[in-house]
Every structure is written in C-alpha cells, then in structure tokens.
C-alpha cells in the first residue's frame, strides 16, 4: 500500500481503463522506470470497479453471479446491485496495480523481499510437473513439487508446506480402481442371476395359471355335456310319450284311406291305356322344369275317374278303330 496525497500525481491514472498500462515516472524518483498495470479499484463509498462497464461513475446492474461482484445463494438467482465503471476518475479512493516493468531501484516492502520469498505458485498437476522438469512417466513427481518453508517457533523444527498433487497415480489409487472394477463385476453378476431367477419364477407362475385355466375349462365342458345329455333324454321321453298317444287315430285313418282307394283302382284297371295317354299329353303341354305340378298326386285322380266311365262302356260295346283317342282327349281338355 502506497499512499499519495498529491492529486496532481494521480492525473496519470485518470481516464484510463482497467488492464491499461501506465508509466509511473511522475509519482516520484523511486518509481522511475516502473510500469504499472491497472487491475481494479474502489471509489470513496467502497463500490468496486467492474470490467466492461465503460463509465467513470456508479450504475445499477442486474447481476446473476457469472460476471463477478455478486455471489448468489442458489442457482438462477439474480440481484440488482450498484457497481463502479471501469474508467478511473477523481472519485477513486484506491487503485489496484501490478508491476509490469521494474526500475533500477527497489521499492521498499515491495520488491526488496523478492529474493527472500521464493514463488510458491508452481504447477500442481502431475503431468504439468513432468513437463516443467522433463521427467519420464515412470519417475516420481513428488520431490519436484513447489514447497514453502515455515520456520519453527519456540524451538520447534522447520516444516515445509506443498500443494496436493492432482492426478497422481500411486499404488493406493491403483488398488482403489481395481476394487471398484471388481465390485462392478459382482453387481453385474448379481443382477444377471436375479433377473434369471425372476424370469424362472414368472414362467412357473404362468404354467400354474394355464393348468388351472385348462382344468376349469374341461370341468365346464363336462358339466355342459352332462346337462345336454340329460335334457336330450328328457325330450326323447316326451316325444315317445306323445307318439304313443297319437298312434291309434293315425292307424285308423290309414286303413280308411286304403279301403277307399282299393275299389277305385280295380274299377280303373280297364282304362289304363287311356289314362296313360292322357297323362302323357298333359306332360307334353307343361314345361319340363315345373316339378311341383308334375309331383302333385291330386291332379292324377280326376284324370283317372272320367277315364274309368268310357272304359266300362267299351267293355260291353265293340271297340272301333280310333276309339281310344277321343277317350284320351276328353279328360285332357276337361283338365
């Protein structure tokens, strides 16, 4: 921290932005040859400068935590805050600078202790350490990491402090990796076994359900068959009883029909040729496809009865030539 009371000396920083380089010769003889770079600062009310805000005064911005000057408690939070622009003005209380170029003289409490305090900002990653020191992949990088000496107080020994080496391969790391792989294999085998057991269990349950369904269907079919057989026996018995009750009247009717038809046939025996001729002529007049008309037995009875009368007359009188034709034609015309 260097305090400067004269505002005229601060004129070299006015209207300069963050990350600009400024020659510090006008600050005093001890700063001759030095070049500083502006990295930030605070105004008199304590608001910090923000890179990218091209103003020389304060303004309010809605910040989300990705550009600095605000640290949200949760992801997605935003807040409107006052920030100072990146251009240096007269309202600045402090300006942060870094030395870009050193002068011939050392600055007290700043550059005169550089030899006593070695840099502790070395590489931390194992591959970066190998790259700096030119080590092989098989060599140990732990002795080459940057260390800082801390002197012991009250008779205690000095101790050294060094950063933790990142991505360092050690026997413990190899052992942990092998253990993770074996545990992963065991989990996989266990999952495969459990899946197969579960599939077998499901298959057994399905088989049992199928067997139960088949047995129930078979029993239903058997019960239906027995019910149908019983109903068929009952209906057959009813039909037999009904036939037994109606058997006698039917036999009497058949006997009456037979007794009526027998004398008619005997009377018509003498007129067989005429009846046949009349039927042949009627069949010729009707179409061949008319089955119901040819199959009716009632139509044949009237043709046979008129043919029987001339047949009885012809039995007493002498039959002349051509006498059969008119006997055959008359019933056909009547019909």
Image (cartoon, rainbow, N blue to C red):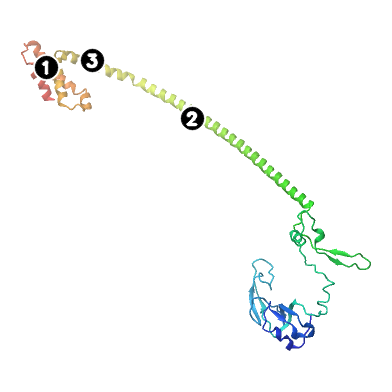
Could you tell me if the residues under marks 3 and 2 are in contact, i.e. CB atoms within 8 Å? no
Q: Residue at x 9, y 13 (%)?
A: 314
Q: Is residue 126 above or below residue 42?
A: above
Query: Mark 2, mark 1: which one is toward the viewer?
Result: 2
Q: Nearer the viewer, residue 313 or 178?
A: 178
Residue that carries the numbered disc 1 in the rendered image:
309
Q: Residue at x 11, y 17 (%)?
A: 309
* Residue 219 screen position, x and y as percent: 53, 30
Residue 258: image quadrant is top left
* Residue 301 screen position, x and y as percent: 18, 21
* Residue 137 screen position, x and y as percent: 75, 55
Residue that carries the numbered disc 2 in the rendered image:
224
Query: Mark 1, mark 3: which one is toward the viewer?
Result: 1
Q: Is residue 38 left or right of residue 171?
A: left
Q: Earlier in the sequence, mark 1 or mark 3?
A: 3
Label 1 secondary element: helix
| CA–CA distance in space, label 2 to label 1 | 67 Å
Q: Is residue 289 left or right of residue 7?
A: left
Residue 59: image quadrant is bottom right
Quadrant location of the N terminus? bottom right
Quadrant location of the C terminus? top left
Q: Earlier in the sequence, mark 2 or mark 1?
A: 2
Label 3 secondary element: helix
Residue that carries the numbered disc 3 in the rendered image:
259
């Amino acid at each position: 921290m260097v305090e400067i009371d004269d505002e005229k000396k601060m004129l070299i920083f006015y209207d300069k932005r963050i990350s600009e380089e400024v020659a510090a010769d006008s600050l005093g003889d001890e700063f001759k040859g030095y070049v500083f770079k502006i990295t930030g600062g605070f105004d008199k009310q304590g608001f910090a400068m923000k890179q990218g805000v091209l103003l020389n005064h304060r303004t309010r911005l809605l910040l989300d935590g990705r550009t600095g000057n605000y640290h949200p408690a949760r992801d997605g939070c935003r807040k409107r805050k006052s920030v100072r622009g990146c251009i240096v003005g007269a309202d600045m209380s402090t300006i942060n600078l870094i030395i870009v170029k050193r002068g011939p003289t050392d600055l007290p409490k700043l550059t005169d202790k550089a030899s006593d305090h070695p840099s502790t900002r070395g590489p931390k990653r194992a591959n970066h350490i190998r790259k700096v020191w030119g080590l092989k992949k098989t060599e140990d990088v732990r002795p080459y990491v940057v260390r800082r000496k801390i002197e012991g107080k009250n008779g205690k020994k000095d101790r050294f402090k060094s950063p933790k080496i990142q991505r360092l391969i050690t026997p413990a790391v190899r052992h942990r990796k092998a253990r993770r792989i074996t545990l992963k294999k065991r989990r996989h085998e266990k999952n495969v076994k459990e899946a197969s057991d579960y599939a077998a269990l499901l298959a057994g349950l399905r088989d049992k359900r199928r067997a139960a369904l088949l047995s129930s269907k078979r029993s239903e079919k058997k019960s239906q068959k027995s019910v149908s057989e019983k109903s068929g026996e009952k209906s057959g018995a009813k039909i037999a009883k009904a036939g037994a009750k109606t058997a006698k009247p039917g036999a009497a009717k058949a006997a009456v029909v037979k007794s009526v038809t027998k004398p008619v046939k005997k009377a018509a025996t003498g007129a067989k040729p005429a009846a046949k001729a009349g039927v042949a002529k009627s069949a010729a007049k009707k179409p061949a496809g008319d089955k119901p008309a040819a199959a009716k037995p009632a139509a044949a009875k009237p043709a046979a009865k008129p043919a029987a009368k001339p047949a009885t007359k012809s039995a007493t009188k002498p039959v002349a030539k051509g006498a059969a034709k008119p006997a055959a034609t008359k019933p056909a015309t009547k019909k």
